[in-house]
Image (cartoon, grey):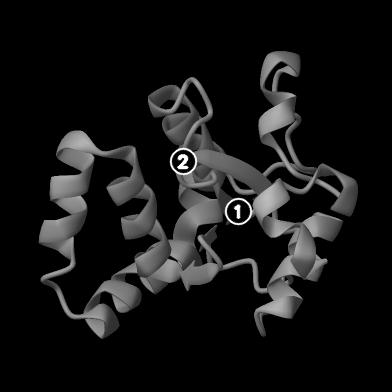
Amino acid sequence: MAAAAVVFYDGVCGLCDRTVRFVLARDPAGRHFRFAALQSDYAAATLAAHGRDARDLDSVCVLDDGRLRVRSDAILAILARLGGGWRVAAAAARLIPTPLRDRAYGWVARHRYAWFGRFEQCALPPPELRDRFVTAAVDQPAAHRSVA
């Protein structure tokens, strides 16, 4: 089985928090995903190694099998990895040209704090899920240790 993908998300964004909870509920065993807030040291080091800036808080990123996907491609990668009907939805959405998908993504990203709220600090996951969240180099999944 492939190593878990790492989802980088804005840790103070209400929409991002809901997205993480959505994915956690559909991957309860933790086989497909781990998570890292863009505000974490791990995100800064990993994204820099891929030519991205973790301070770019308007883009969710997914590191999957050494490949970094951003914006709408990241969302579709998440849906595809969830499998079942989500995989079908991702395949259908890929028929929409990337510039159009990313324009819609950007519009939602610009309004997400107003629509879904913003936390004062990154929300802590419940204790039983904390091992699914990567914060520092020592927490990195084995498949991604070489990038820090």
Height in image: 60 above or below 24?
below
Identity, as a three-letter code, of the amino acid under mark 1: Tyr
Q: Nearer the viewer, residue 140 or 101?
A: 140
* Viewer can see residue 51: yes
**Residue that protrudes farthest toward the top in the picture:** 128
> Taking 66 as reference, is 123 left or right?
right
Tags 2 and 1 touching, CB below 8 Å: yes
Q: Nearer the viewer, residue 91 or 119?
A: 91
Q: CA distance from mark 2 to mark 1?
A: 9 Å
Say which element carries label 2: helix
Instruction: Name the residue rendered at 42%, 62% in the picture.
Output: 74
The quarter of the picture where the N terminus appears is top left
How far from the left and from the top, in percent, is residue 100?
Answer: 23, 79
Q: Nearer the viewer, residue 23 or 56?
A: 23
Instruction: Name the residue rendered at 49%, 29% in the picture.
Output: 24
Label annotation for residue 19 = 2
Instruction: Name the residue rendered at 46%, 41% in the picture.
Output: 19
Q: Nearer the viewer, residue 97 or 48?
A: 48
Height in image: 123 above or below 80?
above
Q: Residues within 10 Å of mark 2 (few under 14, many from 20)?
A: some
Label annotation for residue 9 = 1
The answer to which image quadrant residue 8 occupies is: bottom right
Height in image: 75 above or below 148?
above
How far from the left and from the top, in percent, is residue 23?
Answer: 44, 35
How far from the left and from the top, in percent, is residue 55?
Answer: 73, 71
